[in-house]
Image: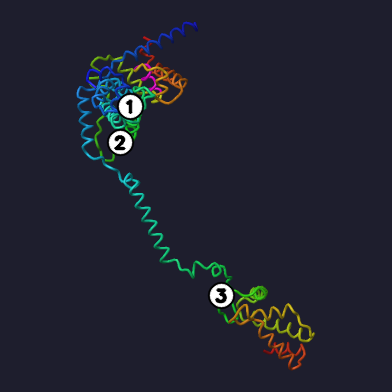
Amino acid sequence: MSEKNLYDLSDEELIGEFQLNNEVRAFEILVARYKNPLFNYVFRFLGDYEQTSDVVQETMIKVYRNKDSYKSIAKFSTWIYTIAGNLAKTELQRRKRKNLFSISSFGEDNESFDIKDEEATPDVLADSGIKSEIIQEALLKISEVYREMIILRDIQEFSYEEIAEMKGISIGTVKSRINRGRAQLQQLLKHIFNE
Amino acid sequence: MELKNLQHDEEQYKKLTGALKHMPKVNAPANFEADLMRRIRQEEESPEKISFLKKLFSPFALTSSSIAVAAATIVLFVLFADKDDFNSYEEFNKPELIIQDAPSGETVNEKPDEIKPEAEKKEIMAAQAVTESNEVLSATTDEFASALVSKFSKAAVRIAASGKNDSNLTGELKAAPSARPGTKLLYKPAVKESETTKDTGNTEEDSVKINEVK
C-alpha cells in the first residue's frame, strides 16, 4: 500500500494493516496521530512532564508489541487510551511508593532532596495562564478515579459511552463519577469562579 | 432566592467545564517519535531478558523437573521398598502381645510366628485379660507378686478341696502359658502348689500355712 493511501486510512484500518502486513509505517502514522492527545491526557493525570513522556512511550511500545491483542470490535482510540490510563495509574502508584520510601529514609543519611517543580516546564507553561496552573493543581488534588473521568470527559472530550467502554464500567457510574469530580473541583476552585 | 442560587451554581459549573475544555494542550517533545523508534529497534535487537521465575516455570523446566522427580521416586521405591516389611498385609496386621512388668522384672515383646487357630486366639485373649488385670493389681513390686501367689494358691486349694473343676479358671490357667511364652506367670506356682496339696492330701488350711511360711 502506498504512503498516501496509508494516511487516508482510519485508525482501525491502520492497526489492521500493521497486524496483517506488519506495516511499520502504519504504526508510525498511528503514533503521529495519538502522541499529542495521549501526552495531554497523561500529563493532566500525572502532572509531571518527564514521567508523562515515559508513560506515553511505554504505551506506544505496548501497542507495537501487542498489536495482535487488539480486536476490531472496539475503537482503536478506546484501546490505546485504556493502555495509557493503566500505565499512568501504575506510574502514580510507583511514585507514591517511592515518595513513601524517600520520606521514611529521610534523616538516616542526611541526603538532600530535590523537589521537582512539576508545573515549571516551559513547554507546558508557554501558552497557559495562571488559571490553568491553578486548575491543574486542583485536578491533582482530587481523587484519582474522579480525576481520570473529568480529564476524559471535559478535557479530552470523550463521550460517556466511550469512557464506559474504556474503563469497563456502566454509563451511570461514569456520569456519577464525573459529577462528583466536578463538585470536588468546584469546591477547590470556588475562589476563582466567584470573582 | 433559591432560583438565583441555582442559576449561580449553574454558571459556575459552566465556567469550570469551559475552563477545563480550554486548558492549554500539552504536546509531546519534538524528538518523541525518533526516540520511540530507536527504543523499539534496540529492544528488537537485544534478546529479551528472562526473569528467574519465568525460567523456573517455563514448559521445558517444568517437564524436565517433573521427569527427574518421577525417576527419583521410582529409584527410591525400588531400593527401599522391602517386600517382607511392607507388602505383607497379614504380617502388618498381626497383633502384638506386649507383656510388661513380669515378675522377673523383664519386659517381653513377642510376636507370634504364625497365625493361630480361632480357639487358641480366644484363649489368648482370655489369658491376656486375666494377666492384664493381675498386672494392674500387682504392679512391679515383689510384695504384690507374692500376694498374688498366695491369692491364687488359696483359690487352687479351694478348687482342689471342692473337687470341682472350674472350667473358666482352668481355661485361663491353661491358656496363660501359651499366650505368654517365655514369661513367668504370677499364678503358676500356685497351680503347682495346689497339685502338690492334692497329691499329698493336705487340707486347705495346711496349704495356706505352707504359703505363709514360704
Is disc 1 placed on a helix, strand or loop?
Answer: helix
Amino acid type, residue under disc 3 in the picture: Lys
Residue sitting at x 35%, y 13%: A192
Q: Nearer the viewer, residue A28 or A175?
A: A28
Question: Which badge, 1 or 2, is on the more N-terminal residue?
Answer: 1
Residue B203 placement (x, y as % from top left): 77, 90
Boundaries of the magenta span: A146-155
Name the image quarter holding residue B138: bottom right
Tell me, yes or no, whether the two marked residues, 1 and 2, touch with CB atoms within 8 Å. no
Q: Which mark is residue B72?
A: none
Q: Residues within 10 Å of mark 1 (few under 14, many from 20)?
A: many
Where's residue B90, x and y in %?
Answer: 56, 69
**Is residue B97 shown left or right of residue A94?**
right
Q: Which mark is residue A84?
A: 1
Q: Nearer the viewer, residue A30 or B213?
A: A30
Q: Which residue was labeled with disc 2?
A: A102
Please tell me whether mark 1 or mark 2 is closer to you in this view: 1
The amino acid pointed to by label 2 is Ser
Residue B111: numbered disc:
3
